[in-house]
Amino acid sequence: MRLRWGILLCLLLVLTGADSAGAEEQDQVKLRRWYLGVQANGGGRDRWDVFGREGMPPAAVDNDGGGGGFLFGYRFGGRFLLGLQLAVTRHDMVGVPEQLFDVEALVTGTVLFRERSTFQPFLRGGFGAGSVVLERPGGNGNTTSLGTATIIGAGFQVRLSSRFSLEWEITGTFTNFLEVYDNPNVDDPYEDWRVKKSHMGIRNGIGLMIWF
């Protein structure tokens, strides 16, 4: 985990100075405003003890997982993007068929550097909601932990045309899981809500951006 944070920090420092590296801008490139992105992602967290129950995480969670998501938003000016991002990462549970799903729903802000060039580094931050959903044995519903989520990261886009770009990002995730809701079918729907801990993690993604 420390190595991952070190790589992320170095990448942020390099990309902060990327604006001066692109001295020759291509002014004839048309910058479209709206974007829609699809993404494949992977990642993990430093712990999975959000449920605090015997047999629940972290004991059986595979920290490395994969999934997907999408992005949708609008370009302001030349380089600032404001949008929504949904990312879902699926993790296997060792020794059992059930799986755990790590979900982020975020409002993100992105600053593109060299926005008219083919290679466009960026910095990205976001805030929203996070959740961890654990399948229960036998298909008897899910156990869900909810909280607030913040991300900070960097990456780059490769412009293929005025309508299409490839994107790669790596972000650090900080989630404060507030409460746990175990069984919505009992007489007292708040019987199993509990305050839990903050988690840290890392997520990387690669996908296609469509501009229109």
Image: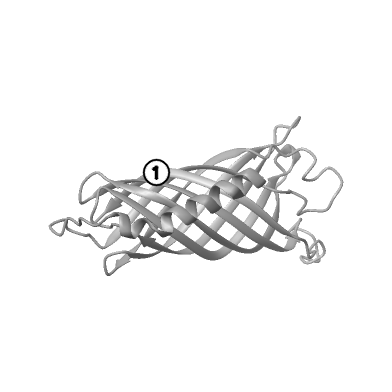
Quadrant where the C terminus sits is: bottom left
- 194 lies left or right of 1: right
Instruction: Determine the residue positioned at 38% across, 49% down.
Output: 156
Q: How is the image coloured?
A: one colour
Per the image, the residue denoted by label 1 is: 207
Q: Residue furthest top?
A: 95
Vertical order, 8 against 34 (above or below): above
Q: Residues within 10 Å of mark 1 (few under 14, many from 20)?
A: some
- 212 lies left or right of 209: left
Q: Quadrant of residue 57?
A: top right
Residue 132 image offset from top left, x and y in percent: 66, 52
Please indicate, yes or no, whether residue 89 appears anywhere in the rendered image.
yes
Vertical order, 139 against 116 (above or below): above
Residue 49 image offset from top left, x and y in percent: 78, 51
Q: Residue furthest right?
A: 54
Q: Quadrant of residue 64?
A: top right
Instruction: Determine the residue positioned at 55% across, 65% down.
Output: 128
Residue 173 image offset from top left, x and y in percent: 59, 56
- 149 lies left or right of 122: right
Local secondary structure at mark 1: strand
